[in-house]
């Protein structure tokens, strides 16, 4: 049985603000199979979290896993995917529907992890933003 681990993170500088997605795909032993980041444009942090999850779900399709373990540091997105939290914002409803469509017919477990446990995906999300938005310098 082939199990993959998907770690994703969406970042927004400002809410809304410049955003990026970080995606890490690992085998069941933690061996990194792929790391990618994507510029998302301007959006809220929650929208960026969903976009990162969606990009990650699209990316894992090439491996056709039997089982998928998903790790996010967004409790909101995790609980919405589990069906524990309601989704009031129309844009998040659309993104949730897309994520659930991609998860259809997939055996998966989704877990909330502390930010420290998702550092790789967080770093990639910030790399995507840094590539498009110059860092501001403090002190002139």
Image (cartoon, rainbow, N blue to C red):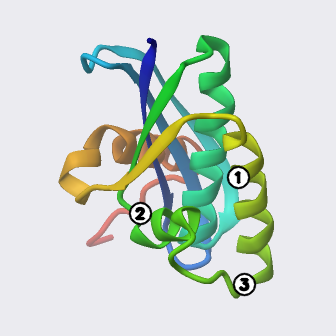
Question: Is the residue under label 3 in contact with that under label 2 (CB below 8 Å)?
Answer: no
Q: Is tag 2's residue or tag 1's residue first in the polypeptide sequence?
A: 1
Quadrant (top left/top right/bottom left/bottom right) for the N terminus: top left
Seen in the picture, residue 14 relative to 134 is either above or below; the reply is: below
User: CA–CA distance between discs 1 and 3?
Assistant: 16 Å
Foreground of the two, 13 or 33: 33
**Residue at label 3?**
89
**Residue at label 2?**
136
Foreground of the two, 40 or 51: 51
| Residue at the image point whose x is 77% and y is 47% from the top | 101
Q: Is tag 2's residue or tag 3's residue first in the polypeptide sequence?
A: 3
Quadrant (top left/top right/bottom left/bottom right) for the C terminus: bottom left
Foreground of the two, 61 or 131: 61
Which of the two marks, 1 or 3, is nearer to us in this view?
1
**Residue at label 1?**
100
The secondary element bearing badge 1 is classed as helix
- Disc 1 crowd rating (10 Å Cα; few below 14, some 14-19, many 20+) is some
The secondary element bearing badge 3 is classed as loop
Q: Is tag 1's residue or tag 3's residue first in the polypeptide sequence?
A: 3
Residue 124: mark in rendering: none
Seen in the picture, residue 36 relative to 63 is either above or below; the reply is: below
How many marks the image carries: the answer is 3
Seen in the picture, residue 91 relative to 104 is either above or below; the reply is: below
Where residue 29 sits in the image (x, y, percent)?
25, 16
Where residue 100 sits in the image (x, y, percent)?
70, 52
The secondary element bearing badge 2 is classed as loop
Which of the two marks, 2 or 3, is nearer to us in this view?
3
| Residue at the image point whose x is 53% and y is 80% from the top | 85
Where residue 49 sits in the image (x, y, percent)?
54, 59
Question: Is the residue under label 3 in contact with that under label 1 (CB below 8 Å)?
Answer: no
| Residue at the image point whose x is 54% and y is 20% from the top | 66
């Amino acid at each position: 049985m082939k199990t993959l681990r998907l770690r994703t993170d969406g970042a927004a500088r400002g809410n809304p603000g410049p955003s990026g997605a970080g995606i890490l795909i690992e085998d069941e032993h933690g061996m990194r199979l792929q790391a990618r980041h994507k510029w998302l444009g301007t959006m809220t942090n929650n929208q960026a979290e969903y976009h990162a999850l969606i990009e990650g779900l699209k990316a894992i399709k090439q491996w056709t896993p039997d089982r998928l373990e998903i790790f996010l540091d967004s409790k909101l997105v995790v609980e919405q995917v589990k069906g524990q939290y309601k989704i009031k914002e129309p844009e998040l409803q659309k993104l949730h529907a897309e994520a659930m469509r991609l998860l259809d017919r997939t055996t998966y477990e989704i877990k909330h992890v502390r930010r420290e446990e998702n550092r790789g995906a967080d770093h990639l999300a910030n790399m995507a933003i840094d590539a498009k938005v110059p860092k501001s310098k403090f002190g002139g």
